Image (spheres, rainbow, N blue to C red):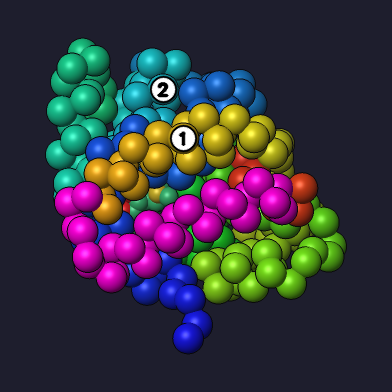
Amino acid sequence: MEEPATHEFDFALINEYFVELERQGPGSPEATIRALSFIGNLSNESKIVDLGCGTGGQTMVLAQNTKGTITALDLFPGSIDKLNVNAGKLGLRNRVKGIVGSMDNLPFQNEEFDLIWSEGAIAQTGFEKSLNYWKGFLKKGGFLAVTYESWFTDERPAEIEKWWVDAVPEIATVGHNVSVMQKAGYVPVAAFTLPENCWIDTYFIPQKTRQEEFLKKYEGNKIVEDFIAFMRQEAELYSKYKQYYGYVFYIGKKYK
Ligand SMILES: C[S@@+](CC[C@H](N)C(=O)[O-])C[C@H]1O[C@@H](n2cnc3c(N)ncnc32)[C@H](O)[C@@H]1O
């Protein structure tokens, strides 16, 4: 039998697993701050949106390193509840607001934002399609910064090719993605690869305890066992094939 891809697991199950983790995808405070360093012109008046924010690991880093207000949007209400509680704990409630919504049906005005942020989420609604759609919500001269799964080489072993094409059918090389961004109406400002610690220290290692907890809580549940096996395989494949792929931060500026 074919192994299931992540999107075939239940949305509620995936979110129950991830909601207790600080990050739901690869990334780190250092990478978020590095991406921010390419973005100019933010002020107290700036409006920022973080799309597919999850529980808001990167949202809080953004808030602590920018001025202005941040709206953070995610489809999963449990993550948004957690984000709003965390914003309160960090004294950021007046600048950070989490809302439930879908990245492909945004409840915002045209040209409302100075900065659109999205870490690890754009593949869910499609890289090219979302870059085009989101641009409408960005002011002229505004910035967009997204992380996205990308190939580092033109060729790779069949095992890893199949895994990623199943998960992200649109996955492409860094060069291709930069040209897609340019075609969508953004001047490419920077593209950099997330270092390994963004996968290992903040994504794979924190999952280990969660996996044990889940297997205990759902002992004998085949769907949960398959899901955990899938998550463990993601980590094994990364250690085997990390020279071929990773997340890349793409930063662009809307020019018209
Ligand atoms: C890999 S996680 C990344 C979360 C967070 N940005 C991070 O880097 O830790 C992807 C997030 O996208 C959210 N998501 C998936 N489809 C979505 C959609 N259509 N609209 C909004 N959020 C969505 C998921 O609920 C999840 O929180």
> In this view of the protein, can residue 53 be seen by the observer?
no
Q: Could one spot residue 62 in this view of the protein?
A: yes
> Could you classify mark 2 by the number of other residues whose Cα lies within 10 Å: few (under 14), some (14-19), or many (20 or more)?
some
Q: In this view, does 56 lie to the left or right of 231?
A: left
- Picture layout, residue 31 above or below residue 165: above
Say which of marks 1 and 2 sits in front: 1
Q: Is residue 61 magenta-colored?
A: no
**Quadrant assignment, res 251:** top right
Look at the image and give the residue range highlighted in magenta: 216-242
Name the residue type under label 2: Val
Q: Does the residue labelled 2 lie within 8 Å of ligand 1?
A: no
Identify the amino acid type marked 1. Answer: Ile
Mark 2, residue position: 61
Most common SS among magenta residues: helix
Residue at 71% x, 53% y: name it: 241
Q: Measured from the top left, where is residue 14 in percent x and y?
A: 30, 57
Describe residue 111's horizontal placement relative to residue 30 as left or right. left
Is 174 in front, or is 144? 174
Mark before the other along the chain sequence, 1 or 2: 2
Q: Name the residue under label 1.
A: 205
Label 1 Cα crowd, 10 Å radius (few <14 / some 14-19 / many 20+): few
Residue 91 lies, with reference to residue 253, above or below; the image says above
Residue drawn at 55 percent across, 67 percent down: 168
